[in-house]
């Protein structure tokens, strides 16, 4: 296959009875199935860096490459996803909101009527040493296009600096909160020194794609196992994302 796919997850856990956006949850049991399937079907699970190499044409692969991304950095990643990823040796990227590490989803808890714990530094550092990469998801999870350019740059540069200092590693990838971005945001992400950025635009990754507008496939609560397979094996996501 000469296309790759980046999967997008949020919470790995049992969805709450109350609260909106159950679709952000994948149950631990379903997640274990999905990872088992990737392994058993022979997909190569790679880092976002390898996805970039694939896009540049410097990696060729007969298998379809798959990258795993987790937005917002919830504590349930540590509890429910990390043990499974570690068992399979799969790399992953978690996008952190740098001002809220060790706190809760302060950017949307009122609107969603649910408070969710975010990862703390101790767990982040432990996972850093076991194939989990961390990317930036801004300082406070704003709608970037509503900010002035100066405010936008503070979110992008500030988050990168904080994360790099604590991780003691370069933070190379960025994830646009709510998938919201404009031309100014793309320019600011480049200026801040990131190598690439993920969106919520649907589709597969093709050779020659723009690294600052990476498409992803959203894995939801209602993603049936057959749909999961269809996303991986076919051009379904490209058709849904209206690209060839
Ligand atoms: Zn987010």
Image (cartoon, rainbow, N blue to C red):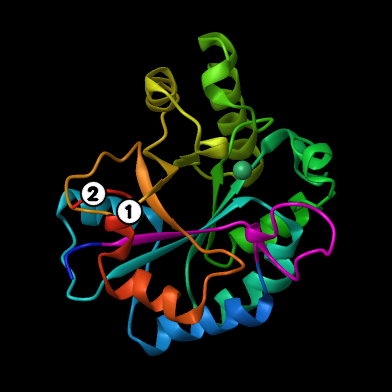
Label 1 Cα crowd, 10 Å radius (few <14 / some 14-19 / many 20+): many
In the rendered structure, find residue 203 and report the number of the disc placed on it. Answer: 1
Image x and y of residue 162, in percent: 65, 33
Give the magenta part as a residue range: 4-25
Q: CA distance from mark 1 to mark 2?
A: 7 Å
Q: Pick the quarter of the image with the N terminus.
A: bottom left
* Residue at image mark 2: 243
Sooner in the amino-acid sequence: mark 1 or mark 2: 1
Q: Image quadrant of residue 77?
A: bottom right
Q: Position of residue 130 (x, y in %)?
A: 57, 67
7 or 67, which lies in front? 7
* Residue 211 located left or right of residue 117: left
Find numbered disc 2 in the image and state the secondary structure of the residue it sits on. loop
Q: Do tag 1 and tag 2 residues touch (Cβ < 8 Å)? A: yes
For label 1, the SS is loop
Is 129 left, or right, of 34 in this rendering? right
Q: Position of residue 85 (x, y in %)?
A: 56, 75
* Residue 34 visible from this viewpoint: yes
């Amino acid at each position: 296959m000469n296309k790759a796919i980046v999967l997008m997850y949020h919470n790995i856990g049992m969805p709450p009875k109350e609260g909106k956006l159950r679709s952000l949850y994948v149950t631990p049991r379903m997640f274990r199935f999905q990872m088992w399937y990737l392994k058993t079907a022979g997909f190569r699970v790679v880092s976002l860096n390898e996805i970039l190499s694939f896009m540049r044409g410097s990696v060729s692969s007969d298998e379809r490459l798959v990258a795993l991304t987790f937005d917002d950095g919830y504590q349930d990643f540590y509890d429910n996803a990390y043990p499974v990823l570690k068992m399979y040796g799969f790399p992953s990227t978690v996008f952190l909101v740098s001002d809220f590490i060790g706190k809760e989803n302060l950017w949307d808890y009122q609107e969603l009527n649910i408070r969710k714990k975010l990862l703390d530094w101790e767990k982040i550092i432990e996972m850093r040493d076991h194939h989990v990469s961390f990317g930036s998801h801004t300082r406070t999870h704003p709608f970037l296009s509503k900010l002035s350019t100066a405010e936008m740059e503070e979110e992008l540069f500030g988050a990168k600096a904080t994360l790099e200092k604590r991780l003691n590693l370069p933070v190379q990838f960025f994830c646009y909160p709510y998938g919201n971005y404009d031309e100014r945001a793309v320019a600011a992400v480049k200026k801040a020194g990131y190598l690439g950025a993920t969106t919520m635009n649907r589709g597969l990754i093709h050779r020659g794609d723009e690294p600052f507008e990476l498409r992803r496939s959203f894995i939801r609560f209602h993603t049936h196992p057959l749909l999961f397979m269809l996303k991986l094996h076919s051009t379904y996501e490209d058709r849904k994302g209206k690209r060839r």
